Amino acid sequence: MRELPIHIELEQKSGKTLYEQIYEYIREEIRKGNLLQDERLPSARFLSDYLQVSRTTVDMAYGQLAAEGYLIAKPKRGYFVGDVRELYNTGMAETYAETEPFCQENAPGWRYDFSPNAIDMSQFPYATWKKITKNIMVDARSHMFALGEPQGDIELRRTICRYLHGSRGVSCDPEQVIVGAGNDFLLLLLEKILGRHIHVAMENPTYSRAYKIFRSFAYPISLIPMDDKGIRVDKLEESKAKLAYVMPSRQYPTGVSMPIGRRMELLHWADGERERYLIEDDYDSEFRYKGKPLPSLQASDRLGRVIYIGTFSKAIAPAIRVSYMVLPYPLLERYRRECGFFSSTVSRIDQTILNEFISDGYFERYLNKMRKRYRMKHDLLLGELKDLEKDFTVSGENAGLHVLLTDRKGRSEEALEKAAAEADVKVYGMSDFCMEEEQNIPATIILGYGGLSPEEIQTGISLLKKVWH
Amino acid sequence: MRELPIHIELEQKSGKTLYEQIYEYIREEIRKGNLLQDERLPSARFLSDYLQVSRTTVDMAYGQLAAEGYLIAKPKRGYFVGDVRELYNTGMAETYAETEPFCQENAPGWRYDFSPNAIDMSQFPYATWKKITKNIMVDARSHMFALGEPQGDIELRRTICRYLHGSRGVSCDPEQVIVGAGNDFLLLLLEKILGRHIHVAMENPTYSRAYKIFRSFAYPISLIPMDDKGIRVDKLEESKAKLAYVMPSRQYPTGVSMPIGRRMELLHWADGERERYLIEDDYDSEFRYKGKPLPSLQASDRLGRVIYIGTFSKAIAPAIRVSYMVLPYPLLERYRRECGFFSSTVSRIDQTILNEFISDGYFERYLNKMRKRYRMKHDLLLGELKDLEKDFTVSGENAGLHVLLTDRKGRSEEALEKAAAEADVKVYGMSDFCMEEEQNIPATIILGYGGLSPEEIQTGISLLKKVWH
């Protein structure tokens, strides 16, 4: 690697953030041909040291440049200049591209990233998936290449019903199931079904993508505090919400599992007025390591108030862009009237592969394997955390793919995150999930372990012990 | 096939449509077990004769029952009772399912269906597609199963840019391209980018799905009349529209190709005020049989006013749920701010397959083949229509997958459609595409030929000649 011309003169008061300055400098160097295709950039760590800026700043700039094709990220090797011949250097690009670039949620490059969203793909039955794909392609006739039904293929909807009934107690007909390319798309459809200006209540803290999506609908949002049983229904009653987005099986990120009593209160709230609905996001109900999981909230719903949403992206693979929504009958009717014409977003080929993967039992087997594997990582992590228990309270364990550490010593999340970052360990502060400023809550760190190997968990935690001593 | 218990007593004045009565009767027979799994239903033709109702009525009832899983349609064999053990017969299903069911746009079962949406899949290089899929699956490592970038994989976006630049003169950077699972999804995103209450202008007649989608956004819609050069920009100026949805290459369904002068007027309109945009839907620009196609409208756009939308569903296969949108820079910035968090709706595996299909030259070869094949059908159809030219004016030829027949003898579209239906031929009246009642326009019939074999075109037209003599 030759010495690179990264002579950025950062101006603290330029009106541009440091990140923007780095981003623009490198982009210009590439555009001018000072950085050539396939040339390797200095590591983010090196550059952040060299420029005396935070690692995150450099990660964001590199991430953005990669998103735009200026750089190519190669796993474990770093960033290289991309093939920019096609990045036509038009005048307009110059004028407009200097604006708020988009922020990658998981910037690449941390040595130990305790992301709560990462999953373990090491055990994925690639061979099986390939075999099913191959067989389907052998049999594939033209109907497979035709546009499927807007709601999804009936065979897959039947399989989903059977799976949800068996594993989550969800009671539904295949006609109630809508298959779509990811939860975000299903929420976009749901907006069309529910209509405008729906006042929505969310747990606080909550899943920030869902929050952003509701905000993009311009829905008024009430953030409802939680206690150890989940969302506080008394506070929900006080809000003017008609819709509540909840995660009763295991709330994200707090890990709270809602007991039956609170569920009944919640359903009672929904039944209390016409046109009140609950969205149950059952995002990772598959992973539970202790005790029997409660069935879904939808299972207890007598009056058709629960909209049940789930996904295969977490339990199978993020690339499997298949989510499902179970609509109660009153909304199903509205879906057909208002949205029945929206074409399916999942190809029939993908639906067929997924259907065989589930109905031939591979999914169940894979889940059992992953449950074991995640439990092993969970137990290992909890063991490693023992030494930290005098400084932190551990919660949210026994299910899902992350635990929470609540500080007992009055330190700030920022300080804890920063100390971790210096050891090249990325941890996530709870305040990222709080959609409003919360006062006086103790610093809480979220440690996701799904995507890390056992060795990475051990080393990562031992580094944290050192910097958080 | 044993004689089936289809003893429906239709009541003309029951408050329920005939279609609903047939639908409900058969559903009840299946639920009660009077019709058993795998039992074959009478053909739609037979039942419509027997009950003395229109073929469409029976088609709609069968189509709805199939959509809900009560029936299974087997190509060329008819409808059979599905496996209904999973259709849990809950009380609620009874109460709510009797409501407006959803209407299948292309009910199956016509002997000769001149649908303008049907395409010919007989020449599709299944073997090549399978080979690419297989190779990709062999190489597939975990990164292929990861969630891709929200805008789509950079390699595919580069390939799309290159293709659009070469074939349509579209000038864009890969960073301007958003890949999504179908045009409908991209329009949903666009609503989030453009915002609420955007007054949209559409050509009249137009593509009805786009109209329904804008209506579902609650956008005020102005329908703008057309002349032989396309949308009337003088009338557009009179409207209060900020956004116009147009199909300049070949308007759907009129087949009008917008000349350069009108395009300039249209761009001038957009440039006339801040925040005016044009959506260019270039839905079937690939098929042109005579003359050189004009480049896209986007190619002439100097100020970033054109949002260019296209799809691979028509040129490759409907199952390929990949559409693309090229955003002008001012909107790109807004996309990143308002929608950058919406996850990609297309799996990386599918993006990779498509990327190889295009960049290895298979797409170009397939397009050339299909252009020849569709031209052959087009020429055949025009030849067959010669005898009808005393009764009809033929227009919209030389491109796309349909032509228009405008009646010279003062007959109604309804009468022409009905006469065709009696010969088991489905044709489509222009009024289906007019979003408002038009007065005094002569009856116009749309004949799509993409999905019919040469023999079917010949026989279908000879039947039409008989019934329309």
Image (cartoon, coloured by chain):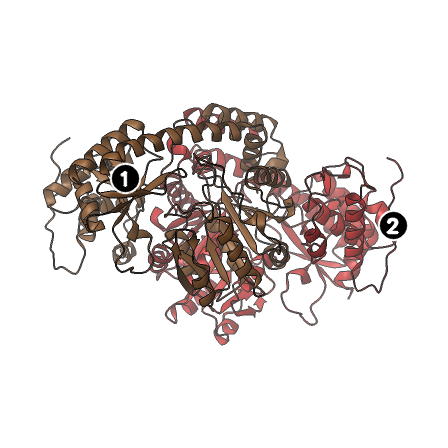
Chain colours: A red, B brown
Q: Which residue is mark 2?
A: A49
Q: Nearer the viewer, residue A203 or B185?
A: B185
Q: Nearer the viewer, residue B83 or A46?
A: A46
Residue sitting farthest toward the bottom: A238
**Residue B342 screen position, x and y as percent:** 57, 53
Q: Residue at x 77, y 59 (%)?
A: A391
Q: Residue at x 44, y 54 (%)?
A: A308
Q: Residue at x 87, y 50 (%)?
A: A49
- Label at residue A333: none
**Residue A448 screen position, x and y as percent:** 66, 49
**Same subunit, tags 2 and 1:** no
Q: Is residue A247 visible?
A: no
Q: What chain does badge 2 belong to?
A: A
Q: Secondary structure at mark 2?
A: helix
Q: Is residue B396 visible?
A: yes
Q: Looking at the image, is A421 positioned above or below residue B30? A: below
Q: Which residue is mark 1?
A: B108
Q: Residue at x 34, y 60 (%)?
A: A330
**Residue A265 screen position, x and y as percent:** 45, 67
Taking the image as shown, residue B215 lies to the left or right of residue A368, namely: left
The quadrant the N terminus of chain A occupies is top right
The answer to which quarter of the image holds residue B152 is: top right
The answer to which quarter of the image holds residue B48 is: top left
Taking the image as shown, residue A297 lies to the left or right of residue A436, namely: left
**Residue A226 screen position, x and y as percent:** 57, 67
The quadrant the C terminus of chain A occupies is bottom right
Q: What chain does badge 1 belong to?
A: B
Q: Amino acid at mark 2?
A: Asp
Of labels 2 and 1, the one closer to you: 1
- Mark 1 neighbour density, 10 Å: few (under 14) some (14–19) many (20 or more): many
Whether tag 2 and tag 1 are in contact, CB under 8 A, the answer is: no
Q: Looking at the image, is B277 positioned above or below residue B281? A: below
